[in-house]
Image (cartoon, grey):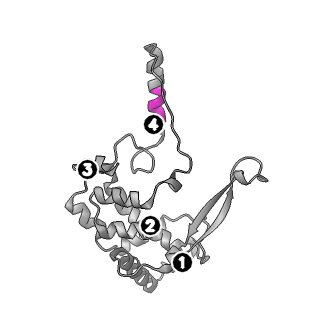
Amino acid sequence: MVSHIPASCRISNDDSELMTSPFLMEDLLEQVKRTPKVSRPGKDGLSYVFFNLIFQHPKYNELLLRVYNDALSGRLFPKSWLETCICLLPKKGDLRLLTNWRPITLINCDAKIFTRLLNSRLVLVASQLIPPWQSSFMKDRFIADNGALVNLAIEQASIRNSDEIGLLCDQEKTYDRIHPNYLRAVLVQFGFPEQFVLAITSFS
């Protein structure tokens, strides 16, 4: 499937350099500021609230910035970022049934801040690589637009008395079914530098 990605669908050399350039202090502070105030911490028990307090002290800022840049460069990836814990979140329905609970794997909040830093770079170029009809998880795109387009198509089909049909496919447990090696291959095909790909896939 990766071979079907056209050669023209690659990031530029300038964007490639941007992906691996060291994080700046303002990058870090911006992502910390965006973290939710209420969120379950990982195995170490340190919440986003804790990190928001820590980041008010310049010495800690500089230390953590070095940690994140070391991880980005591949020099040192903290082992604690690979430690996880699993908790159950209730869904709708009878909570006496196991099927109405959703397991979620939590990583430590300092690791999640690193993923936020990586994502802040990724979204800058994603719209150049991903077609416009992919609207979810994309900056400046709104998933409800696709719903509006479907309604418009249904209305037009009704007006034209068309015999066309629409098909909705929803894959169960999608995130569990996509192999990390495939994601790695896609990023490489898009032209992302190996250093950036390694920083992302170090979590898998």
Q: What residue is shown with label 4? A: 146
Q: What residue is shown with label 2? A: 115
Percent x, y of residue 84: 57, 71
**Front residue of this view, candidates 170 and 54:** 170
Amino acid type at mark 4: Asn
Numbered badge on residue 96? none
Tell me the magenta residue range: 145-152
- The answer to whether 121 appears left or right of 6 in the picture is right
| Dominant secondary-structure state across the stretch colored magenta | helix
- The answer to whether 186 appears left or right of 155 in the picture is left
As for residue 151 lying within the magenta part, the answer is yes
Q: Do callouts 3 and 4 mark residues in contact (Cβ within 8 Å)?
A: no
Q: Earlier in the sequence, mark 4 or mark 2?
A: 2
Q: Rounded to the nearest whole Å, what is the CA distance between mark 4 and mark 2?
A: 27 Å
- Look at discs 2 and 1 and give the one toward the viewer: 2
Within 10 Å of the Cα at label 1, are there few (<14), some (14-19), or many (20+) other Cα atoms? few
Q: Rounded to the nearest whole Å, what is the CA distance between mark 2 and mark 1?
A: 20 Å
Q: Rounded to the nearest whole Å, what is the CA distance between mark 3 and mark 1?
A: 42 Å
Q: Earlier in the sequence, mark 1 or mark 4?
A: 1
Q: What residue is shown with label 1? A: 53
Q: What residue is shown with label 3? A: 9
Q: Do callouts 2 and 1 mark residues in contact (Cβ within 8 Å)?
A: no
Judging from the image, what secondary structure is the residue with disc 2 in? helix
- Look at discs 1 and 4 and give the one toward the viewer: 4
Residue at figure coordinates x 41%, y 50% from the top left: 138
- Look at discs 3 and 4 and give the one toward the viewer: 3
Q: Earlier in the sequence, mark 3 or mark 2?
A: 3
The quarter of the displayed image where residue 105 is located: bottom right
Q: Do callouts 4 and 2 mark residues in contact (Cβ within 8 Å)?
A: no
Amino acid type at mark 3: Cys
Within 10 Å of the Cα at label 4, are there few (<14), some (14-19), or many (20+) other Cα atoms? some
